[in-house]
Image: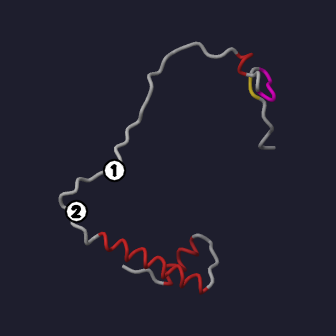
């Protein structure tokens, strides 16, 4: 499989990018180089390789949920720049 300049133009149009002819040619060459490199991976013998989702063994480390008293409102709002009716007051984002 190879990428043509027409493919690059199509993707650029979808991304609403204005590319010069030189950029189109550069991206075409670069994308074809990437595809050629990926094609080399097809030459590898992976018959005895177990499928994995990640190269490292990862697992989520979760702590147990423990019910405990929350902070009193006075302490929560001590460092707050502004508070109103028991809530943090922030500058309006929408008009």
Marks counted in the figure total 2
x then y, percent, for residue 78: 76, 21
| Figure quadrant of the C terminus | top right
SS of the residue at dot 1? loop
- Within 10 Å of disc 1 (Cα), the crowding (few <14, some 14-19, many 20+) is few
| Residue 9: in magenta span | no
Residue shown at the point (59%, 13%) measured from the top left: 69
Query: Seen from this angle, which residue lies furthest left?
Result: 48
Residue shown at the point (43%, 79%) measured from the top left: 32
Q: In which quarter of the image is residue 35?
A: bottom left
Q: Which of 1 and 63 is in front in this view?
A: 63
Residue shown at the point (59%, 70%) measured from the top left: 15
x then y, percent, for residue 28: 49, 81
Along the polypeptide, which appears first: circle 2 or circle 1?
A: 2
Asked whether, in this view, residue 59 is left or right of residue 90, the answer is left
The answer to whether 34 is drawn above or below residue 90 in the figure is below
Task: Answer whether labels 2 and 1 touch (C-beta < 8 Å).
Answer: no
The answer to whether 13 is drawn above or below residue 92 in the figure is below
Main SS of the magenta segment? loop
The Cα–Cα distance between marks 2 and 1, rounded to whole angstroms, is 15 Å
Magenta residues?
A: 80-85
| Figure quadrant of the N terminus | bottom left
- Within 10 Å of disc 2 (Cα), the crowding (few <14, some 14-19, many 20+) is few
x then y, percent, for residue 47: 18, 61
Q: Nearer the viewer, residue 18 or 72?
A: 72
Residue shown at the point (22%, 56%) measured from the top left: 49
SS of the residue at dot 2? loop
| Residue 84: in magenta span | yes
Query: Mark 1 highlights which residue?
Result: 53
Query: Mark 2 highlights which residue?
Result: 46
């Amino acid at each position: 499989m190879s990428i043509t300049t027409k493919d690059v133009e199509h993707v650029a149009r979808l991304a609403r990018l204005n590319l010069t002819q030189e950029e189109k040619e550069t991206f075409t060459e670069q994308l074809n180089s990437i595809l050629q490199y990926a094609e080399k991976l097809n030459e590898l013998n992976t018959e005895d390789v177990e499928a994995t989702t990640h190269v490292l063994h990862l697992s989520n480390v979760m702590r147990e949920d423990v019910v405990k008293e929350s902070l009193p409102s006075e302490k929560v709002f001590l460092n707050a720049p502004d508070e109103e009716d028991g809530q943090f007051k922030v500058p309006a984002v929408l008009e």
